[in-house]
Amino acid sequence: MRILVIGSGGREDALVWKLSQSPLVSEIFVAPGNGGTASSAKNIDIDAGDIPALVKFARENNIDLVVPGPELPLVLGVCDAMGEAGIACFGPDAFCARLEGSKSFAKEIMAKAGVPTAKSLVFTDVEEALACARAWGAPLVVKADGLAAGKGVVVADTLPEAEAAIREMLAENRFGDAGSTIVLEEKLMGEEVSLLCLCDGETALPLSSAQDHKAAFDKDTGPNTGGMGAYSPAPLLPDSKLEEMTSIVIRPVLAELARQGHPFRGILYAGLMLTADGPKVLEYNVRFGDPECQPLLMRLNNDLAALMQAGASGSLAKQKLAFSPKSALGVVVAAAGYPGSYEKNLPIDGIEKAHAKSGVRVFQAGTASRDGRLFSTGGRVLCVTALGDDLAQAKRLAYEAAEKIDMPGSRYRTDIGDKGLKRLQNS
Ligand code: AMP
Ligand code: GLY
């Protein structure tokens, strides 16, 4: 099988790492890839959002399976375009990708499918939205409808904060078109956990659970980021509960989308808040999370290429997922200043030393190699991931390995996994 992976993050490095272990796979290309994927696959210089160039490359290089990593190419219709070219793609079509690309669309599907979620209303008019916010009162969540690189959600604990967010989005055009429609939502209380499923249009197979850490600093303080670390499994959602949760938050959505003529293929990811009233969906993503993908794939014992091929061709029902009972934990090493402005081109050393520890894998994100040396090209630079007998050991190993990384000004959160450890201690 010849595979084209689309994207350039730590998630894509992990996908390449896992796919390259499959005896079914002969060659892997990555568009555009990073310093990590360059060592185990062939990077090609095509932007992840350039659909015509991706299709042309896939055609000319006899690609058998396309694996899109990030949401942008999915929302832009990469799977539709590959399908028209007769090339299998493990991802949803553009219609289904709106589950992530439009929060109001996701709300509409959830309502039709009967999936529990926060109470919400959709607005395009600033005065109407302000009136609703005043009527509801704080706390309140204001969300830009479209893709806003993880920055389009404001959890406002006071009314003035909510009003400011509404004005920024609807009157001052802060997110452009992505914020010209907004969703106002009640604030949910509880702990967050992620449930990701492999889907083939009809069947949904739940992966083991994972927990992300979105805030920049320890104890969930500071601005939101793409994710500063993740671990799997999350004791909050044990394997014994996966089937039940999938039937509440994933399968009804698959049935509704199929009913509308668009069976969902690929990864459907539910961001959940486990509240006192039961689970509620905060958002859907239509792809693997980054960095959740890294610890999840370290625990997956199946052949990922076979699973994705089955997902793309509608035959997942015959597959059975096998996860290692061990725990995996990934720590994101970021450039100083991230998620604000940060320096690039910083030299990176120590990956070999980190790899010398058993059970450790350093996935690369914002990196490129030049003249045999590795340099940073992004804010999230590495995800140092370790597999341990339990969560405590995975955490210890990942942090021992992260200490070996040498990059000027780099930093990481020191509390990845602590919520899970606390839950285990209390149970
Ligand atoms: P989203 O992109 O919708 O997942 O929102 C990003 C983050 O904002 C989530 O991971 C939550 O931490 C928070 N969030 C979103 N919606 C809500 C809500 N209704 N109540 C509380 N927190 C929320
Ligand atoms: N880590 C969250 C995301 O990938 O959206």
Image (cartoon, rainbow, N blue to C red):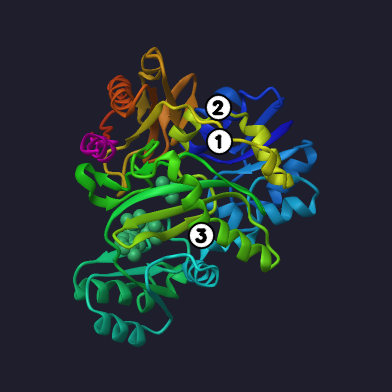
Residue 73 image point, x, y percent: 60, 52
Nearer to us of marks 3 and 1 is: 3
Q: Nearer the viewer, residue 257 or 14?
A: 257
Q: Nearer the viewer, residue 56 or 324?
A: 324
- From the viewer's perspective, is the residue at label 2 or at label 3 nearer? 2
Mark 2 and mark 3: Cα distance apart in space: 28 Å
Answer left or right for 206 relative to 171: right
Q: Quadrant of the C terminus?
A: top left
Q: Tell me what residue is drawn at x 55 percent, y 23 percent.
A: 39
* Three-letter amino acid code of the residue under disc 3: Glu
Residue type indicated by callout 1 = Gly
Residue 43 seen in the figure: no
Along the polypeptide, which appears first: circle 3 or circle 1?
Answer: 1
Please report whichever mark, 2 or 3, sits nearer to the chain's N-terminal start.
3
Q: Is residue 196 above or below residue 350?
A: below
Which numbered disc covers residue 301? 2
Disc 3 to disc 1, how far (Cα)?
A: 23 Å
Q: Which residue is mark 3?
A: 100
Could you tell me residue 84's position as x and y percent?
79, 54
Residue at point 41%, 18% (across, down): 359
Q: At x 66% / y 30%, what residue is drawn?
A: 28
Q: What percent of the width, then of the height, locates residue 127?
A: 33, 87
Q: Is residue 11 magenta?
A: no
Left or right: where 91 falls relative to 335: right
Q: Secondary structure at mark 3?
A: helix
Give the magenta range.
415-427
